[in-house]
Image (cartoon, grey):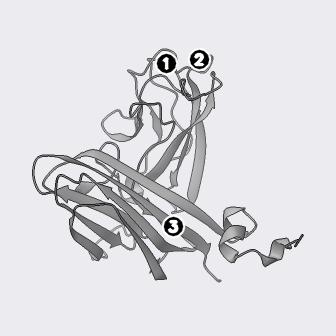
């Protein structure tokens, strides 16, 4: 029997296994079941918040959730937030759930939030029982803006579906593949946007620029970029979609590699 050594595996396998200390991958999944006829972000609640650094905010779980999603309950006991702080560094924080009440606020201040997941649950999940009981909404501490939502989606998903992401400082972002799924009864247009210089505090600002456009999509497609699309540090990568009539469901799975920049 042939025995293959670890170092004979492709580089991408080492990245996925966490063996590459200067690189980590995000399988960034976004979903919007009600895309209208105008462009909106491909995310659970149709938003991707992008405040300037001076408006960085703490976040919390919004009041109105299920009573079982509490730190001592049968549902979600905590959630983990991932995004960028006002310096442009990637940050993560775990927040305890509080049932139907609002949770405590994060100690971290955020300018981007691109992933939230259930971190601990009071239930051993199965094919019939999920790890949270109700939808879990993340908002700013002022209570004026919803930032993300962990939805039920027919079965408790335990994670957000945000199709956009932002490259941290001292990194480059490489997008190597995109999977697009659409409502096949409608024609769907999708655009990839980029905005560099997210920490700029005054004009002139870097513009929002179209990077790729997919027009009239009516079936699922997978695009592998032989040469990955490169995004510099502190750059938003935005995924927007619209449908030809009414509303339609769109989902996007984007493979993004964050690679530490050489100094």
**Earlier sequence position, callout 1 versus callout 3:** 1
Quadrant occupied by the C terminus: bottom right
Q: CA distance from mark 2 to mark 1?
A: 10 Å
Name the one closer to the observer, 244 or 234: 244
Relative depth, front residue between 40 and 112: 40
Q: For the residue carrying disc 1, how many other residues have a C-alpha within 10 Å: few (<14), some (14-19), or many (20+)?
A: many
Using a 10 Å C-alpha cutoff, classify the residue at mark 3 as few (fewer than 14 neighbours), some (14 to 19) or many (20 or more).
many
Task: Determine the residue positioned at 56% across, 29% down.
Answer: 127
Q: Where is residue 29 shown, x and y percent of the image? A: 44, 54
Gap between marks 1 and 3 measured at Cα: 34 Å
Residue that mark 2 sits on: 74
| Residue occupying the point 22% across, 61% down | 218
Q: Which residue is mark 1?
A: 99
Using residue 24 as the reference point, say whether residue 149 is left or right of it. Answer: left
Label 3, secondary structure: give it: strand
Residue 256: mark:
3
Identify which residue, 222 or 117, lies in the foreground.
222
Q: Are marks 2 and 1 in contact (CB under 8 Å)?
A: no
Q: In this rendering, is residue 135 above or below 253?
A: above
Query: Circles 2 and 3: CB distance less than 8 Å?
Result: no
Q: Position of residue 200 (x, y in %)?
A: 38, 70
């Amino acid at each position: 029997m042939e025995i293959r050594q670890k170092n004979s595996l492709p580089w991408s396998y080492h990245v996925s296994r966490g063996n590459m200390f200067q690189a980590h991958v995000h399988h960034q999944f976004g979903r919007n079941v009600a895309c209208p006829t105008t462009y909106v972000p491909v995310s659970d609640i149709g938003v991707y918040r992008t405040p300037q650094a001076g408006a960085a905010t703490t976040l919390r779980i919004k009041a109105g959730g299920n009573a079982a999603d509490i730190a001592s309950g049968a549902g979600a006991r905590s959630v983990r937030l991932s995004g960028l702080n006002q310096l442009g560094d990637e940050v993560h924080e775990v927040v305890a759930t509080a049932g139907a009440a609002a949770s405590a606020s994060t100690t971290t201040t955020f300018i981007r939030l691109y992933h939230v997941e259930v971190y601990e649950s009071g239930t051993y999940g199965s094919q019939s029982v999920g790890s949270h009981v109700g939808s879990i909404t993340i908002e700013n501490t002022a209570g004026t803006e919803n930032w993300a939502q962990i939805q039920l989606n027919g079965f408790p998903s335990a994670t957000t579906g945000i199709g956009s992401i932002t490259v941290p400082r001292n990194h480059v972002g490489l997008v190597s593949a995109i999977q697009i799924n659409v409502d096949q009864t409608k024609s769907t247009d999708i655009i990839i946007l980029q905005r560099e210089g997210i920490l700029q505090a005054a004009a002139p600002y870097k513009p929002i620029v179209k990077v790729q456009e997919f027009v009239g999509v009516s079936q699922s497609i997978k695009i592998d970029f032989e040469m990955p699309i490169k995004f510099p540090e502190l750059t938003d990568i935005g995924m927007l979609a619209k449908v030809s009539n009414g509303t339609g469901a769109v989902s996007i799975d984007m493979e993004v590699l964050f690679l530490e920049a050489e100094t």
